[in-house]
Every structure is written in structure tokens, then in C-alpha cells.
Image: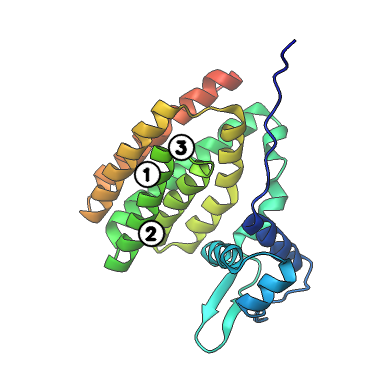
Amino acid sequence: MEFEMEKIQVEKPSSIIIRKLKEMIEVGVLKPNDTLPPERKLSEQFGVGRSHVREALKKMEFFGLLKTQPQSGTVVVGLGAKALEGLITNILEIDNNDFFSLIETRILLEVKIAGLAAQRREDADLEFVEKALEEYERAVLNNTDDISEKDFMFHLSLSRCSKNSTLKSLLMTITPDILNHFERERVCSKESRLEAVNEHRALFNAIKDGNEFKAQKIMEGHLNPILESAKKKYNSIY
């Protein structure tokens, strides 16, 4: 008799480091303006290679929890939006219509972000977005385990172009749980991910060209299938 076993998800060392440091920030062990030990010291304390520490610190800086300062090292910024993720950890379990409204809110945020990004982007921002785009494309083409994470990083990079920290914070708060849920439910097929690669590239080009209307329409078209999928899956009343 054959049994279908669920694959065991092994947590990456960098993810464990992020979780541990985030917990230390949340409980006040690490306070705003505290300087973290050097990378080499953290590597010894966590018992992992320096590359894992470097990856963790880079992500936490991207999420707004840490900041690298010349001569000072890596400094704690404070409780960024990502640290508040625990407040909505169970939001996907409360009610289907609430989950639908969460997706709807994400679309409203991202369409606005796309428009502002086209208006306000600078050359340094575009380089940052293009790098995130290329990493997402590689993840999809190679079918790696971190596709959802790279997808999130691309969308988050657009918020940098928007120059609106509140929109970025809201996006960081609600999006990870949505992506995790879709990953568990296998909502995104390989074909849809390949299509998303083209949509991401078109979105980047519209923002690069400063075409606000086109950027918003591409983003809306990119995310609406997710909304329609949620309507069908959860029998939304909307």
C-alpha cells in the first residue's frame, strides 16, 4: 500500500536568525539604536556560516528593522511593520470574507503604489527594482523553493519607488500571510508564474517610462485573477 506523505519543510538558517532577532526586538532585549555584534560574532553565536547571517541581516534591513550605518555597524531601527506580523498571524483562519477583503485591500494598495512609483522613481530605485525582478525571474525559471519570497520582494521594491513609507508598511503587514496561504493551497500554477514573469517585466518597464496610467492598469490586471480566484474558492458574497 502506498501512502502520500506531506513534505517536511526545513527552516532555512537565515529564517531562524530573523525569527530570533525579531523576537529579541519585540520583547525589548534589543532596543532602538542598539548595535548588533559584528557578523563574525553573530555567526559564532548562532552556529551558522557568515553567509546565512549576512542574508538574514540584509532581509531585516529591507523590512525596516535594521539599518547599516558607516562606522557604527548594524543598528536596530525599532519596531517596523514586519515585526508586527504576529498581530495578524491568524487572520487567515477567522473568516473567508475577511480573507477576501484582505486580498482586495492588497490590490488597492499595490495599484496606488504602482502609480506613485511611476511618478516618483529615481535611477537608484529602478536599479533596485530590476535586481529584485531578475531574482524573481531566476526563481521561477529554476522552480526554486523561494518563489513566493522573491515575488514579495519584487512587489515590495516597488513601494520604495513610491516614496510612501506608510503604503510600504501596510503592504509588508498584509502580503506575507496572503502569499503563505496561496503557497499552502497551491493557488499559483507553474503556468501562472511564467505569465507573472512577463507581467512583472511589463510593470517594471511602465514604471521606468514614468507611465502612471499604464503601470496602474498592469498592476490591476496582474492582481485581479487572484481576487477572482478567491471569490470562487471562498464563495465570497462580494
Q: Can you tell which of label 3 and label 2 is closer to the viewer?
A: 3
Q: Residue at x 62, y 66 (%)?
A: 49
Helix, strand or loop at label 3? It is: loop
The residue that label 1 is drawn on is: 137
Where is residue 122 drawn, in percent x and y? 29, 66
Amino acid beneath label 1: Glu
Of callouts 3 and 1, which one flags the residue occurring earlier in the amino acid sequence? 1
The residue that label 3 is drawn on is: 143
Helix, strand or loop at label 1? It is: helix
Helix, strand or loop at label 2? It is: helix
Q: Residue furthest left?
A: 209
Where is residue 80 drawn, in percent x and y? 61, 64
Image quarter (top left, top right, bottom left or bottom right) of the N terminus: top right
Amino acid beneath label 3: Asn
The residues tagged by marks 3 and 2 sit, at their Cα atoms, a distance apart of 30 Å
Asked if 20 appears above or below 196 in the picture, the reply is below
Amino acid beneath label 2: Ser
The residues tagged by marks 3 and 1 sit, at their Cα atoms, a distance apart of 10 Å
| Picture quadrant of residue 215 | top left
Where is residue 166 drawn, in percent x and y? 51, 60
Instruction: Answer left or right for 228 relative to 201.
Output: right
Q: How many marks?
A: 3
Q: Can you tell which of label 1 and label 2 is closer to the viewer?
A: 1
Q: Residue at x 39, y 49 (%)?
A: 112
The residue that label 2 is drawn on is: 162
Of callouts 1 and 2, which one flags the residue occurring earlier in the amino acid sequence? 1
Asked if 146 appears above or below 7 in the picture, the reply is below
| Picture quadrant of residue 179 | top right
Q: Residue furthest front?
A: 1
Q: Residue at x 27, y 52 (%)?
A: 207
User: Does residue 160 appear in the picture of this structure?
Assistant: yes
